[in-house]
Amino acid sequence: MQFSATLGHEWVAALGVMGALFAGMAGGAAWLAPRAERSAHAGRWFAGLEIIIGLWGLLLAWALPAVLPMVSPWLGGQPQPWAHAALAIGLPLLLMLPSTVAMGATWPALSRATQAGHGAMGWLYAAHTAGALLGLLASVFMLVPAWGLQRSALVIALLNVLCAIAALVLTSRSASAPDDRRDAVPVGDSPRTGLLALGVMGLLGIGYETLCIRMLSQVGENTVYSYAVMVGVFLLGTAVGALPQLQRISAGVWILVTGAAVAGGSATLWWADDLAGGLGGEVVVALCALLVPAMAMGGTFTAMCRWALRHGTTLGHALAVNMVGAALAPALVGVVCLPLLGPGSTCCVLVVGYGLLALSFARHDQAGSRVPWLAVALVSVAIVADPLLAPLRHIDVAPGGQVLRHIDGPMAAVSVTQDEEGVLRLRINNRVQEGSSAASPVEARLALLPLMLHPHPQRALFLGWGTGYTARVAALDNTLQVQAVELLPEVINASALFDAVPQFPATRAKVQVVQADARRFALASEQRYDLIVADLFHPARSGAGSLYTVEHYRALRSRLAPGGVVCQWLALYQMELGTLRAVTAAFRSVFPDAVVVLASNSLDTPVIGLVARIDAPFERPLVVAQRMASASAGLQQELQRTRLIDAQAVLGSVLGSSSGLQRWLGATAANSDDHPVVTYGAPWDTYRPQTTPAQRLGMVLMQLGEPDARTLQTDLDWDAMASGVVGAPASDDASILAAYIQARNRYLLLGLSRPDLGSSEGREALAKSLQLLLGVSPQFSPAVEALRALRPLATPTVPSPSTP
């Protein structure tokens, strides 16, 4: 999590950190483990290793937040692939090396300390893996959500020290003599055979886990808990498979069983979408796809380790080779096989790999004459079935619709579908909709509202591209240079299908689209922007929470030019108020004068924004009106289409002032890298929502209250501008704006009451309520439009503001 802020969330960074972890553990298993196995004091070795793990982990938890941000400017916002890959592997490898090397030697050292000939190896491996499972679940579901990263690291470090003390006490009771006994090695056999098999098994096993995680991300919610469940089920299965009572089966048979289990588990991936639904559904799908294959992998691994020990290899060397294969697996499966072959063929390749491994190992293992024939049958079935299988992809297509493009990338699957009405939709992992060709006025407002709050912007940065509609709207401003950052190259590729959509502005060529991680780009870029707009990142998705942290907003502030405007859009229909408060507290800790705005009057999909301007006050209505009047013809057309017809409509989007936000937040903890409230809290908004989007909007309206004229004048800093602006006094502008906001809030609350439109009495009552709103603010045009819809042949009368 901490490395991603510097290295990014691209596949290079994700695989680099994983590869560094496995490489360090492989080094420890190859270098330290044999020394511990030869020692008469293996228990002391284990204790020392545990202390190193705990203390170094604690040091990293405190040092990484200070060290890693300094690396981002050197790496750059859009680094060269070779430099990115080298740093993504080298930096985590170097920083984690003491702890990962120690981790790689702990199991062999403990196994040797318990019994000279590793007789309890299976039990210890099962217990070791079960401990990893408990640590994973406790960290993800309890420690980090409650205490944050640093305090959780302290708890884990203390547990490592307690393990070291326990090991010293238990192993000191019995002396451990060096074990020089070696079983006779059968003629023609070589330790290299078992080591090679262990390396291939590591590659195939972690390769299958990588495949399942990628495919199940298309049917689950892709939260931090989704990944914890999948990895947890894999660890559970491995632990159960390693139990000694299962080790009577020979290694060759275990390899064949694992291939069959992978084939069966892969088959469930085709219908996983039928089982998914909430966190419980994710658990069921993970159990179906991963549990039995992982059990077989655990049994195969321990059986192969026993085989290697009988043939003169240390347990450390066996573990090291297995981890080398595991380190290569994510890159080979995720980066090579999935994009080139597709998920279905990748499943078949893995099954064929196990079949060939069983076939080649059969002559070295007394597994019976049936194993070769069964291995040939498994390979043959996988090869024959490959071209007959339906495409392994989960895409929701409406009746009469079609898939126009589907791209399986290393990190996600991106698809563009078209329904029978011709509407195109772009989705990531079939869950997150990045936009459609039926672009709504709200999507245009995401660009127009912040754009109109700056008097003369020259450069704009949009974090998030999607279909590109919002950034394309901004590019209608002829004087504006627009840059957009998008994490997934597959999204940029698929968005080309929207270039020909008539509703989309033909400004794609004017936008510089950068493929990069938004968090790292903000840290590394040297450019200054007059406008920064952050898109609607789904807060529950894994990795998105880092884009709502205090640290990220500090980076955005450093990218703003003097007088620059920053806007963070938030989908209120995707988050409960607790998540909203945590994000708002983070934003406001960096931008204390921020205000909250409402993108539209939608009750079903409300979108709000956090807006701030640095080193300058918000512009008065006259300046905003001049900005709108001087806009290009294309921009003015979009303003009219989206009902941003005047300065009151733009400034009247304010939902709460900075002082109102301060009262509303109270002592709310800000979302940060150390205390990732959003990452661990937002998923529950998706799994078990407590309120509807309309109810959340109503609660926000009631809790924020209505700012009065004096509060608005102070919070928008219009007092400082009073003498320098020609036109109405600041107090008059504030009074008009306060009345507009009051009318808007009552209009929304009126909609939340669900007025009866099925009877003439209900429509007449609604018309009277709307007429009263115009009495509060004659400038509130939505009430005028609603009255015209109720009385098509009548002209609404606009009473004076004094009318009761």
Image: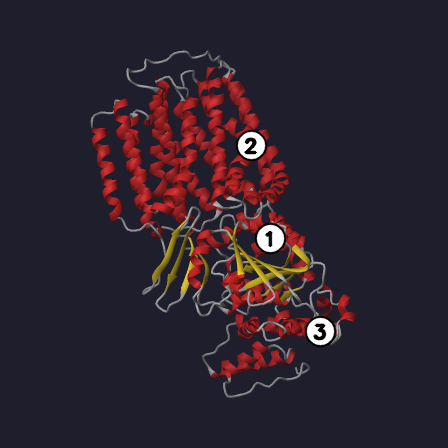
Mark 3 residue type: Asp
Residue 94, disc: 2
Q: Earlier in the sequence, mark 1 or mark 3?
A: 1
Q: In screen coordinates, is 242 left or right of 59? A: left
Is residue 669 visible to the viewer in this orientation of the structure?
no
Q: Which residue is mark 1?
A: 582
State the image coordinates of residue 355 (x, y, percent, origin top left): 27, 34
Q: Which residue is mark 3?
A: 733
Looking at the rendered structure, the secondary structure element under dot 2 is: helix
Which residue is pictured at 66% across the width and 71% down the height?
624
Earlier in the chain: of badge 2 and badge 3, it is 2
Please identify the quarter of the rendering in which residue 398 is found.
bottom left
Classed neighbour count for the residue bearing mark 1: other residues with Cα under 10 Å, few (<14), some (14–19), many (≥20): many
**Is residue 279 or residue 670 the one in the foreground?**
670
Q: CA distance from mark 2 to mark 3?
A: 59 Å
Residue 555 horizontal side relative to residue 433, left or right = right
Q: Is residue 50 left or right of residue 801?
A: left
Q: Nearer the viewer, mark 2 or mark 3?
A: 2
The residue lying at 46 percent from left, 28 percent from top is 26
Identify whether 194 is placed above or below 269: above
Q: What amino acid is labelled 1 in the image?
A: Ala
Q: Position of residue 669 (x, y in %)?
A: 63, 50
